[in-house]
Image (spheres, rainbow, N blue to C red):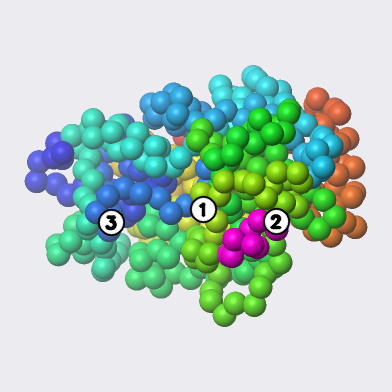
Amino acid sequence: MNSPLSGRSPRVIVVGAGPVGLTAALTLARAGVAVTVLERSPELGSHSLATTFHPATLDLLAGLGVAEPLITGGTLVDRLQWRTCRGRVLAEMNMGLLTGMTDHPFRLHADQGRLLTLLERELARHRHAQLRLVCAADAITDTGAQVHIHAGGQWEAADYAIAADGAHSTIRSLLGVPLAATPYPTQALRVLTDTPLQQRLPGLAPLTYLQDRTLSCSLRQLPDHWQLVFRLPLTKDPSPATPHPTQRRPSRAAVTALTRQALPGFGKNLRILDAHSYRLARGVVPSLRHGRVFFAGDAAHLTSTAGGLNMNAGLQEAAELGEILAAVLSGGLPDAALDGWATRRRRILLQAVIPRAEAQVAGVQDRDRHRRRPAVTRLRAIAADPAATRDYLAKASLLDTISPPIGHT
């Protein structure tokens, strides 16, 4: 793919070909902006734990032409359910109540690898976009008029750069931009099983939160397996917190003990495909803009994996940034509009994304019954009121954080 701007450098360089980086690149390419994506790995892949795509995210992916095939290969979550481990349903909410607020009144559980394939395919349709694999960025200079990035043994110049290179961002490190991470007091254990839980538990929703006196677990249905995610006390561990699995493998006995408690009667007989624990942290960069470089996704923020909000927020901010950058480069908006984007998205992270992700764990999923009981009471009251349910689902799905029209940042 060659740039149509003969003899010119790409207008924007995106570092990182994960979901956030490719979303930003495709948004720019569709607007006619020459863009180059630099990826250190030899092939596309994702180490992210997130599998949840919210309505607002599906709306923006539809605008990029990738929502329909992603939905076809995923599991639609039409309702959310809370129940005890003994099977008593505490509350249930119908995602259909979001009809009229979104073109996709449901959540989707899907493999991020499928999204990457779809985004790459769409990006390849644009001659003024290119994806360079095995091309790790190892130096960066911001001259004030351009950004120069050294990758793959050569320097590349652009008007702007987007760092979407993950929680351990090389660009963030090279620029000396801090991301102070505060560890959460709990860790997560993710268990994958191909046992058809929906056949064992009649009425089970594709997304169900289980709880009892001492256990917190969420069940997520994907096309070919279920995920059980347990919230557990943090064990003593000198290693730093990370938003990605550290591939700590718990013993079979420990996993079986938890699945038996979560699913009495048949939990000990689950066919386990994989199980690993991981630690989490929260943090946001001081600013999503650093001169002519912008941070998005895990390179900009970390939070609990609850609800998949961190990834969905990253996809939103990437698409919005792409639109505003395209407008600035075409002369339709002043450069100051990019400051507005950075300020607004950071405010959303601090006031909406992080608190809502943490509230999911601190509420009904709290291991402390004194905090859990009033949370269950509030949740049941919300579920009994359609208007309150609609508002709850809209906020839990980030429908109130979608980007405003261009020029109104």
Label 3, residues with CA under 10 Å away: few <14, some 14-19, many ≥20:
some
* For the residues bearing labels 3 and 1, Cβ distance under 8 angstroms: no
> Magenta residues?
250-257
Residue 274 is labelled as: 1
In the rendered image, the vertical position of residue 25 relative to residue 275, given as above or below: above
Label 1, residues with CA under 10 Å away: few <14, some 14-19, many ≥20:
few
* Percent coordinates x, y for residue 253 in the rendering: 64, 62
Residue occupying image coordinates x 65% and y 42% = 219
* Percent coordinates x, y for residue 341 in the rendering: 49, 47
Residue 258 is labelled as: 2
Residue occupying image coordinates x 20% and y 37% = 128
In this view, which residue lies farthest toward the top? 100
The kind of residue on which mark 1 rests is Asp
In this view, which residue lies farthest toward the bottom? 238
* Percent coordinates x, y for residue 313 in the rendering: 54, 45
Residue at mark 2 to residue at mark 1: CA–CA distance:
14 Å
Residue 252 in the magenta stretch? The answer is yes
The kind of residue on which mark 2 rests is Leu
User: In the rendered image, which residue does mark 3 sit on?
Assistant: 41
Instruction: Give whichever of 256, 95 is nearer the camera.
Output: 256
Q: Is residue 71 left or right of residue 235?
A: left
Picture quadrant where residue 332 is located: top left
Quarter occupied by the N terminus:
top left
Residue 354 is labelled as: none
Residue at mark 3 to residue at mark 1: CA–CA distance:
24 Å
